């Protein structure tokens, strides 16, 4: 399909005499994306979902991602509520994905959300299992749905997206958190003594042992240095909040963190300080991974 035909497909149904198209805002964004890099989209196809527009190639992959996005959208809407949908771009190469995602870094990621778009990195995406593909698409659509004017802490940003992503996966904890569990078996992790003396200065000291398992709620440096374990820690933090306080409170915490600092949001929504949440999360993770 030529670029002109791709644009025509994105314009289909938008004629003045046609009934209003609920996807019009997304179609406009997709057209803008195609026009930004027209050389990428020769031979591309377009698939429309209820709240997504997928553009890219090959056609079979575009159709698969549209199907995954439809299921993901239902999960995201169930947890987060109504949202504005997303444009999913499926370029042919990692280099094209990097160009589309900039200034975000694609690296070895299978997909990345930037603004109201999800960029799929085809080679990395192809290496995933069927379940992994669904988790990734749901994770990235969660990022788009839950984006806002204020940056939330990295542990909450990625942990919440993974919480929603893994909800319907059927994967057990020991599978999702395999790297963290292995680290804990090898070294015990930070804060073990502090958990036995809850509230003492030892807990504060444990939080500063950067790089150790469960040293702290993961920060950007942790995601750079030990990404697998940091994502797992963040997921388990959000999973713990949902289990103890309820999923609605987890969503409320995220929404609050979009408009106020994280410490204030934690106090107002959960009645906890960051140090208290860290201690509770650390103890919960250690106990759960020991069982699994």
Image (cartoon, rainbow, N blue to C red):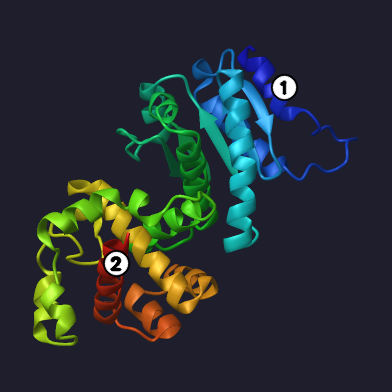
Q: Secondary structure at mark 2?
A: helix
Q: Position of residue 135 (x, y in %)?
A: 48, 44
Q: Position of residue 187 (x, y in %)?
A: 10, 58
Relative horizontal placement of residue 116, taking residue 63 as reference (left or right): left
Q: Residue at x 67, y 23 (%)?
A: 7
- Quadrant in the picture for residue 200: bottom left
Question: Which one is closest to the eye, mark 1 or mark 2?
Answer: 2
Q: Position of residue 2 (x, y in %)?
A: 63, 12
Where is the N terminus found, in terms of image quarters? top right
Query: Is 264 or 290 nearer to us in this picture?
Result: 290
Q: Residue at x 76, y 45 (%)?
A: 22
Compare marks 1 and 2 and give the one earlier in the sequence: 1
Within-10-Å neighbours for mark 1: few <14, some 14–19, many 20+ = few
Relative horizontal placement of residue 82, taking residue 88 as reference (left or right): right
Q: Residue tagged by mark 1?
A: 8
Relative horizontal placement of residue 84, taking residue 199 as reference (left or right): right
Per the rendering, the mark at residue 84 is none
Query: Is 126 or 273 nearer to us in this picture?
Result: 126
Q: Residue tagged by mark 2?
A: 285
The CA distance from mark 1 to mark 2 is 52 Å
């Amino acid at each position: 399909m030529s670029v002109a035909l791709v644009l025509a497909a994105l314009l289909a149904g938008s004629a003045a005499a046609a009934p209003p198209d609920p996807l019009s805002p997304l179609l406009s964004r997709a057209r803008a994306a195609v026009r930004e890099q027209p050389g990428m989209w020769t031979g591309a196809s377009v698939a429309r979902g209820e709240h997504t527009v997928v553009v890219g190639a090959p056609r079979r992959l575009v159709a698969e991602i549209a199907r995954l996005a439809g299921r993901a959208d239902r999960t995201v809407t169930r947890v987060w509520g109504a949202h504005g949908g997303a444009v999913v771009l499926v370029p042919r190469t990692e280099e094209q994905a990097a160009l589309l995602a900039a200034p975000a870094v694609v690296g070895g990621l299978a997909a990345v959300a930037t603004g109201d778009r999800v960029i799929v990195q085809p080679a990395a995406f192809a290496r995933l299992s069927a379940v992994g593909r669904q988790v990734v698409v749901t994770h990235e659509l969660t990022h788009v749905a839950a984006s806002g004017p204020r940056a939330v802490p990295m542990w909450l940003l990625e942990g919440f997206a993974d919480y929603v992503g893994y909800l319907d996966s059927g994967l057990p904890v020991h599978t999702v958190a395999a790297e963290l569990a292995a680290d804990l078996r090898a070294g015990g992790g930070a804060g073990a003594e502090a958990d036995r003396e809850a509230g003492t200065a030892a807990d504060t000291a444990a939080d500063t042992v950067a790089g150790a398992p469960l040293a702290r709620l993961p920060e950007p440096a942790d995601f750079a240095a030990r990404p697998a374990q940091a994502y797992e820690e963040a997921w388990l933090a959000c999973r713990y909040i949902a289990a103890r306080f309820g999923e609605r409170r987890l969503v409320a915490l995220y929404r609050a963190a979009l408009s106020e600092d994280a410490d204030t949001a934690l106090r107002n929504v959960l009645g906890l300080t960051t140090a208290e949440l860290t201690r509770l999360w650390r103890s919960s993770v250690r106990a759960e991974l020991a069982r699994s």
